[in-house]
Image (cartoon, rainbow, N blue to C red):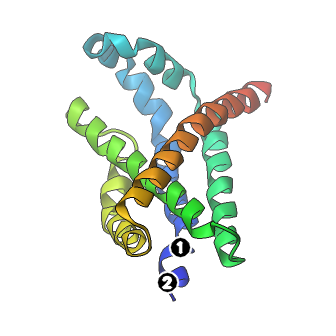
Amino acid sequence: MLILLLIIPFPLVFLLHEAEEVLLQHRWMLAHHDALKKRFPKLKPLLTHLSRLTTKAFAVAAFEEWLIITVATCYVLIQGDYCLQIWSALFMAFSFHQLTHIVQAFVVRGYVPGIATSLLLLPYSFMILQSIWYFMSGLEMLLWGMSGIIVMIVNLRFAHWLGMSVAHKA
């Protein structure tokens, strides 16, 4: 029952969150790019990169990430080795991603793409994290969570490169 209620919905939850980002990120970034560069000059390279990430490029990147989450969810269904740990690492990375949107909204003092679904999904994320806590020790959660965040960061670079490559070839 735990799998049906908590694990299987994750790809759909991820898709909902990414849809908000895909639909709004590029236009929002273009509208706020100059103001953000003035407020955060050290972030200029990142802001420039995000401004060049078109809606199509972002959609390709989000799709690549969704595939990873879907494969990990299917791996839980076939009960592969370390399946819950791998899935949990990805979920904890996603939860960290949600927190970054909340922090961004506070720093920007307004809407950022991804904040609405991050806030909407907080109860779901809390419930999942609480469930993970029941089968992992605090140290295991920390180690798997950090592993998931590292994988997320490395994969994000790849996903953005893939998205930009596909979008510019079309």
Q: Are marks 2 and 1 in contact (CB under 8 Å)?
A: yes
The residue under the point 47% across, 44% down is 21
Q: Report the number of numbered marks.
A: 2
Check the image and report above or below for 35 versus 126: above
The residue under the point 32% across, 62% down is 122
Res. 91 mark: none
Few, some or many residues within 10 Å of mark 1 (<14, 14–19, 20+): many
Q: Nearer the viewer, residue 161 or 117?
A: 161
Residue occupying the far bottom of the picture:
1
The local secondary structure at tag 1 comes to: helix
Give the image location of residue 101, x and y in percent. Answer: 34, 42
The residue under the point 35% across, 12% down is 42
Give the image location of residue 25, x and y in percent. Answer: 46, 36
Visible residue check, residue 94: no
The residue under the point 71% across, 71% down is 80
Check the image and report above or below for 24 versus 70: above
Tag 1: residue type? Answer: Ile
Res. 7 mark: 1
* Displayed quadrant of residue 106: top left
Left or right: residue 60 compared with residue 108 = right
Give the image location of residue 56, x and y in percent. Answer: 64, 37
Tag 2: residue type? Answer: Leu
The local secondary structure at tag 2 comes to: helix
The residue to which callout 2 is attached is 2
Give the image location of residue 16, x and y in percent. Answer: 49, 59
